[in-house]
Amino acid sequence: MSFKIAVTTLKAVLIYLIYYVVSPFVLPFLAFITGLAETIEIFITVYIVLMILGDITAGTIYNCFFNVGKAFFVIFYLLSLAGDSVFMVSYQNFNLTADLTMLYTIAALLGLLGLAKAVMQAIIFMSERAETGIKP
């Protein structure tokens, strides 16, 4: 159990380090969009917590619950971002308008694949438990 916790902690630290290294390069672009940097940080934090809980409960039915929760969180996060998907940036005589609704919608639909994977893992877990006679 302690090895599993150590590996999970190492994965979480690596993911946060990647975010920490990449964020200074992305933050100047996020300055044009108010509040997006904070929501990305909240997303990273909640996703890491759900990942840690899912890894610690590996081999149990709770792992499937956390994986489904993680998939729903990603889908609802992307859908909430889709409401503010038109970005306008002005610089002197140059105006740039980008509508990212389709991009967010496609990403949310791809999140459904994660949800389907988590549901299939739960079905496989329960069928393996039923075959061996072990209670979940």
Image (cartoon, rainbow, N blue to C red):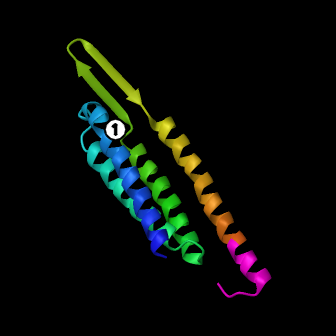
Q: Considering depth in this image, is 34 or 4 the residue closer to the camera?
A: 4
Q: Dot 1: within a 10 Å radius of its alpha carbon, few (fewer than 14), some, or many (20 or more) residues? A: few
**Residue 119 magenta-highlighted:** no
Q: Considering depth in this image, is 10 or 118 the residue closer to the camera?
A: 10
From this view, report whether residue 55 is shown above or below residue 81.
Answer: below
Percent across and percent down for residue 75 are: 49, 54
- Quadrant of residue 115 within the rendered picture: bottom right
Viewer can see residue 50: no
Q: Which residues are magenta?
A: 125-136
Residue that sits furthest to the front in the current view: 3
- Quadrant of residue 90 within the rendered picture: top left
From this view, report whether residue 6 is shown above or below residue 136.
Answer: above
Q: Considering depth in this image, is 120 or 11 the residue closer to the camera?
A: 11
Residue that sits furthest to the left in the current view: 92
Amino acid type assigned to the residue bearing label 1 in the image: Val
Task: Left or right? Give the position of 85 relative to 29.
Answer: right
Percent across and percent down for residue 60 are: 59, 77
Q: Secondary structure at mark 1?
A: helix
**Residue 128 magenta-highlighted:** yes
Residue at image x 44%, y 34%? 100
Q: Considering depth in this image, is 39 or 95 the residue closer to the camera?
A: 39
Percent across and percent down for residue 61 are: 59, 77
From this view, report whether residue 127 is shown above or below residue 97.
Answer: below
Task: Left or right? Give the position of 20 relative to 81.
Answer: left
Residue at image x 64%, y 65%? 119
Residue at image x 22%, y 18%? 91
Task: Left or right? Give the position of 24 relative to 46.
Answer: left
- Residue highlighted by disc 1: 22
Residue at image x 50%, y 65%? 69
